[in-house]
Image (cartoon, helix red, strand yellow):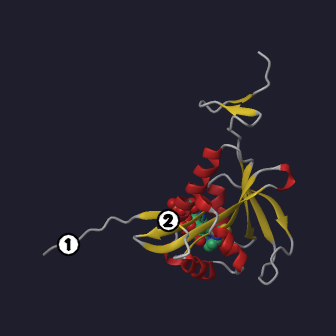
Amino acid sequence: MFKLFYRTSIELGDVTPHNIKQLRKLNTVVFPVSYNDKFYVDVLDAGELAKLAYYNDIVVGAVCCRIDTSDNQRRLYIMTLGCLSPYRRLGIGTVMFQHILNYVENDGNFDSIFLHVQVNNDGAIEFYKKFGFEIVETKKHYYKRIEPADAHVLQKTLRKTSLNSSNHVHSNGHLEKKDKKA
Ligand SMILES: CC(C)(COP(=O)(O)OP(=O)(O)OC[C@H]1O[C@@H](n2cnc3c(N)ncnc32)[C@H](O)[C@@H]1OP(=O)(O)O)[C@@H](O)C(=O)NCCC(=O)NCCS
C-alpha cells in the first residue's frame, strides 16, 4: 500500500485582474466592513503591497497596504490583512506580515507601520503585539455600521535606514546621527 505525504506550502502571489474577484470574496468573508470599487482598482496598482496567500495552492488569505504620507511622515498603512478562519494559527498571517516588514525594511525610509482594529478584536491585537505593535490611540465611532464602533490604532515604529534619511543604522544595530561631529 502506498501512502502519499504532501508537504504543506504557504506562498504569496500577485493580485491581478484574473484573481481580483477571489480577493473581493475573501475580504467579504474575513472582514466586517466592505471595501469599495476604488479600493480594488488601487490594489491592482499596489505591486508588492498587495498579495494573496496560498495554502497548498488554495487562496486563503490576503494583505493590502498603501503608503500614507500625511502629518509629514511616511508610513505604511495596512488596510487589510486577513486569513480564512479554518486556516488561522498556521503561520499564514505571519508570512503576509513578514513580506510587508521586508518591504519596509528594504525601502529603509518608513517611519512606521500602522493599522486600525476593532477594539474587541483580541486575536488580531495579540498577533500584532507579537510583532512589536503598540496601541497608540483609540478612536471613538471610527466604524460606521459595525459594533463596537471604536478602533484602536496599532503602530510599529521603525528606524529609518536609508542613506537619504538623517540617521544611519549600522549593521550592529546602533543608530548614528549623520551630522554627528567627530
Ligand atoms: C489576525 C490574523 C490575520 C492572524 O492570522 P494567522 O494566520 O492566524 O496568524 P499566525 O498563525 O501567523 O499567528 C502568529 C502568532 O500570532 C498570535 N496570534 C494569532 N492569532 C491569535 C489569536 N486569535 N489569539 C492569540 N494570539 C494570536 C500567536 O502568537 C501566533 O503564534 P502561535 O500560533 O504560534 O501561538 C487572523 O486572525 C485574521 O485573519 N483575523 C481576521 C482579520 C483581522 O482581524 N485582521 C486584522 C486587521 S487588518
**Crowd class of label 1 (few under 14; some 14 to 19; many from 20; radius 10 Å):** few
Relative to 85, is 96 above or below?
above
Relative to 29, is 88 above or below?
above
Q: Which amino acid lies under the numbered mark 2 shown in the image of this protein?
A: Gly
Foreground tag (1 vs 2) = 2
Relative to 169, is 134 above or below?
below
Left or right of 142 in this view: 156:
left
Q: Circle 2 — which element?
A: strand
Q: Which amino acid lies under the numbered mark 1 shown in the image of this protein?
A: Lys
Nearer-N-terminus badge (1/2) = 1
* Residue 17 % position (x, y): 56, 75
Residue for badge 2: 13
Locate residue 66: give its quadrant.
bottom right
Is 148 in front, or is 26? 26
* Residue 30 % position (x, y): 61, 78
Question: Label for residue 3?
Answer: 1
In the orientation shown, which residue stands out farthest toward the left? 1
Q: Residue at x 62, y 60 (%)?
A: 49
Report whether the residue tagged 1 is closer than 8 Å to ligand 1: no
Q: Quadrant of the C terminus?
A: top right
Is 164 in front, or is 181? 164
Q: Residue at x 57, y 69 (%)?
A: 62
* Residue 71 % position (x, y): 86, 53
Is 51 in front, or is 96? 51
Left or right of 7 in this view: 40:
right
**Crowd class of label 2 (few under 14; some 14 to 19; many from 20; radius 10 Å):** few
Q: State the count of labels.
A: 2
Q: Residue at x 80, y 55 (%)?
A: 69
In the orientation shown, which residue stands out farthest toward the bottom? 145
Q: State the separation of the CA atoms marked 1 and 2.
A: 30 Å
* Residue 65 % position (x, y): 67, 63
